[in-house]
């Protein structure tokens, strides 16, 4: 992408309405534009990051055996009347009446709709276990939308739903999602702490929130310090093979989170090991058994030939919230420092004295070579000062910048700058590309 023809409306000033750093940086970096309370346009740079996060979430869901589909944003009220949640959900649900006076709603979540799809097609335990998910926009008429995309009214969520013949198998499905979540957050460059949680309007008796630590977070984390050491990177799971050994790798961790993590239990933790911190809830998983299947008569035949309500769980990840959450965890005084896995571009080229013909040729050569090597490249070909170029690229958080200027060109070198450390080195273009290939 050439910056001269891209759409990157960066702001010089920090907008006064933004009170937390991720919101400020998303506005300044030209990632989002507010259209109303809790409603945002995703500008090109913001959309790129959103899509990268979505792709990682999708890959990990697929790897854990979940199957993607897509349900609509607008739902008929009847399904919610059947489950009993139409009245329970209260003012957070955006209710709509269509031209035929039919009651509709903008979905805040999809338990009812997925249960309706399930009961239409599945009859036998032999078709289970099954896990279906989608990645779709939701609407919740939050009383206090704030912090930009972190607490929006319209937001992108991945929601998965598991179906099992009995409670034992349902708990295995839950555990499998639990592991998939740890993998997903690892890949996003985050340490997410699972905490036992209230089930709220979703219902059920078993639930975990996944929290990333940030001072600006809305959730209070009560945690045994020793748990922070357990989700160490390197516990890479491969769901392709037999599941048992894979799950057992995480079992110790899972079991530990089962044992503690609400405020009362926290009081029992040895004082030396307590931490209490603030964090952002980026995921939430629930096992609620028969809550919806009983009310909506989603029954299956078990091995004994008996018709029983299917056992269900649901598993949410706040995809759009994660964009803000990652920035909260990954920034410095110059701007965003994206983890490589979600950076909008892998590498940028900044030309100094961009109108000089030799510089233009060198810039084009670097652009072509980097693209051929498979990198997503942002070429800052604008006729702007080095200061403007570097500060823009630092603000938007591109992990690597190759600076090409007349002095270096004479000596056959470019400058390779690393966003995360601020370090830089001089080397030939080909060596810089080789280095990036090794590092990526
Ligand atoms: N049906 C269940 C699981 S699929 C459910 O809706 N769970 S939830 O209410 O906890 O939402 C799942 C995730 O969506 C949350 O963990 C959070 O990361 C994200 N989320 C919830 N509300 C908002 C909001 N107003 N703005 C941005 N993200 C949100």
Image (cartoon, rainbow, N blue to C red):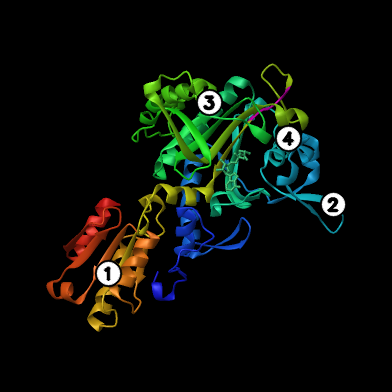
Residue 263 image label: 3
Mark 3–mark 2 Cα distance, whole angstroms, equals 44 Å
Q: Are marks 3 and 1 in contact (CB under 8 Å)?
A: no
Mark 3–mark 1 Cα distance, whole angstroms, equals 55 Å
Mark 1–mark 4 Cα distance, whole angstroms, equals 56 Å
Q: Label 2: which residue?
A: 102
**Where 77 sits versus 333, above or below?**
above
- For the point 47% across and 21% down, which residue is it? 255
Characterize the magenta stretch by its predominant secondary structure.
strand
Mark 1–mark 2 Cα distance, whole angstroms, equals 58 Å
Q: Label 4: which residue?
A: 119
Residue nearer the viewer, 240 or 223: 223
Q: Name the residue at the right extreme.
A: 100
Residue 372 position, x and y percent, is 32, 64
Residue 78 colored magenta?
A: no
Label 4 or label 3, whichever lies nearer to me, is 3
Mark 2–mark 4 Cα distance, whole angstroms, equals 23 Å
Q: Label 1: which residue?
A: 366
Q: Are marks 3 and 2 in contact (CB under 8 Å)?
A: no
Q: Quadrant of residue 132?
A: top right
Mark 4–mark 3 Cα distance, whole angstroms, equals 39 Å
Which span is picked out in magenta? Answer: 308-312
Label 3 or label 2, whichever lies nearer to me, is 3
Locate residue 260 relative to residue 310 in the image: left or right: left
| Quarter of the image where the N terminus is located | bottom left
> Does label 1 or label 2 sit earlier along the sequence?
2
Residue 439 position, x and y percent, is 27, 51
Residue 298 position, x and y percent, is 74, 31
């Amino acid at each position: 992408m050439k910056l001269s023809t891209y759409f990157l409306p960066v702001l010089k000033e920090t907008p006064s309405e933004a009170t937390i750093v991720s919101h400020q940086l998303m506005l300044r970096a030209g990632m989002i534009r507010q259209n109303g309370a809790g409603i945002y346009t995703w500008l090109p740079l913001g959309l790129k990051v959103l899509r990268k996060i979505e792709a990682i979430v999708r890959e990990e869901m697929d790897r854990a055996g979940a199957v993607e589909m897509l349900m609509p944003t607008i739902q008929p009220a009847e399904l919610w009347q059947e489950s009993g949640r139409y009245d329970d959900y209260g003012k957070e649900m955006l209710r709509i009446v269509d031209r035929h006076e039919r009651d509709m709603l903008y979905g805040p979540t999809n338990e009812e709709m997925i249960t309706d799809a399930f009961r239409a097609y599945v009859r036998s335990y032999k078709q289970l276990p099954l896990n279906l998910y989608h990645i779709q926009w939701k609407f919740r008429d939050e009383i206090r939308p704030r912090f930009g995309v972190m607490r929006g009214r319209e937001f992108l969520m991945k929601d998965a739903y598991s179906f099992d013949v009995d409670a034992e198998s349902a708990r295995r499905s839950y555990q499998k999602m639990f592991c998939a979540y740890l993998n997903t957050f690892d890949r996003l460059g985050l340490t997410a702490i699972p905490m036992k949680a209230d089930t709220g309007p979703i219902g059920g008796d078993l639930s975990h929130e996944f929290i990333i630590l940030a001072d600006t977070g809305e959730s209070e984390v009560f945690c045994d310090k020793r748990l922070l050491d357990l989700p160490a990177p390197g516990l890479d799971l491969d769901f392709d093979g037999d599941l048992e050994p894979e799950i057992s790798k995480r079992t110790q961790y899972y079991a530990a989170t089962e044992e503690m993590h609400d405020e009362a239990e926290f009081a029992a933790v040895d004082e030396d090991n307590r931490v209490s911190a603030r964090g952002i809830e980026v995921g939430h998983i629930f096992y609620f058994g028969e809550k919806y299947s009983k009310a909506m008569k989603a029954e299956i035949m078990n091995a004994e030939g008996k018709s029983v309500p299917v056992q269900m769980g649901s598993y949410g990840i706040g995809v759009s919230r994660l964009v803000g959450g990652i920035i909260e965890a990954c920034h410095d005084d110059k701007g965003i420092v994206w983890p490589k896995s979600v950076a909008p571009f892998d590498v940028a080229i900044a030309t100094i004295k961009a109108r000089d013909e030799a510089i233009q040729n060198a810039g084009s050569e670097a652009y072509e070579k980097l693209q051929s090597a498979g990198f997503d490249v942002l070429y800052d070909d604008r006729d702007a000062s080095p200061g403007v170029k570097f500060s823009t690229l630092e603000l938007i958080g591109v992990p690597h910048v190759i600076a090409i200027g007349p002095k270096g060109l004479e000596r056959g070198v470019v400058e390779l700058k690393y966003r995360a450390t601020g370090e830089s080195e001089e080397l030939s273009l080909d060596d810089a590309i080789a280095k990036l290939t090794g590092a990526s």
